[in-house]
Amino acid sequence: MLKEIVCGILLVFVFFGFVAIAYYAILKILSPKKNERYTVVIAARADSGDITNRLCSEALRIDMLCERNNGAVVVMDCGMSDKNRRACEDFCRESRNCYICRPDELAELIVKQLELRI
C-alpha cells in the first residue's frame, strides 16, 4: 500500500516536471530573438478585469526567459479603475522594467527605453 502511494506521488511530480519543461520550451520558441529589444504593451480599460495578474504574468515570463535587459512591460491606462491603477503602480514600483503610462505618454516612454538600452 505504501509503495503505491509513493509511486503515485512520484508520478505526480514527474508529470508536473514534464508540464513545466513543455511550458518553458513553448515560451522559448515563441519569444523574440535574444539581442532584440521589445516592449509588451497592455491596454487597460475600466472593464479589463484584473490587470495586475496580466502585468505579473508578463513580467514573470520575461524573468523566466532571462530577458530582463531586453524586455519591458508597459500598462497603458485607458481609463482603468483606481483599484487596478494602485495595484499596478505598486507592482511597477517593486519590479524592474515594468511601467504604467497614459496613451499620450506611450511613444515618449518607448523612445526613452530604447535610448537607455543602447
Image (cartoon, rainbow, N blue to C red):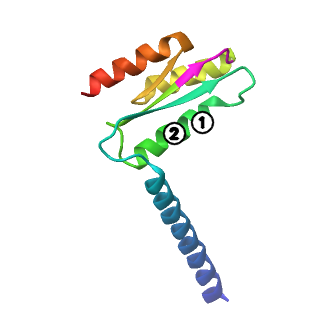
> Residue 3 at x, y = what percent?
60, 88
Front residue of this view, candidates 95 and 97: 97
Mark number displayed over residue 58: 2
Q: Residue at x 41, y 21 (%)?
A: 110
Q: Are marks 2 and 1 in contact (CB under 8 Å)?
A: yes
Q: Residue furthest right?
A: 47
Whether the magenta-drawn stretch holds residue 77 is answered as: yes
On the image, the x and y values in percent for residue 39 come to 44, 31
Disc 2 marks which amino acid? Glu
Q: Which mark is residue 54?
A: 1
Packing grade of label 1 (10 A; few <14, some 14-19, many >=20) is some
48 relative to 38 in the view: left or right = right
Residue at 46 percent across and 61 percent down: it is: 25
**Picture quadrant where residue 79 is located:** top right
| For residue 115, above or below residue 97 | above
Above or below for 43 versus 64: above
Q: Is residue 81 left or right of residue 59?
A: right
Residue 35 location in percent, x, y?
Answer: 29, 43
Q: Which residues are magenta?
A: 75-80
In the figure, is residue 57 to the left or right of 47? left
Question: Above or below — where is 37 with respect to 78?
Answer: below
Q: CA distance from mark 2 to mark 1?
A: 6 Å
For image coordinates 61% across by 36% down, the residue present is 53
Residue 102 — which label? none
Q: Secondary structure at mark 1?
A: helix
The amino acid beneath tag 1 is Arg
x, y percentage for residue 78?
Answer: 64, 16
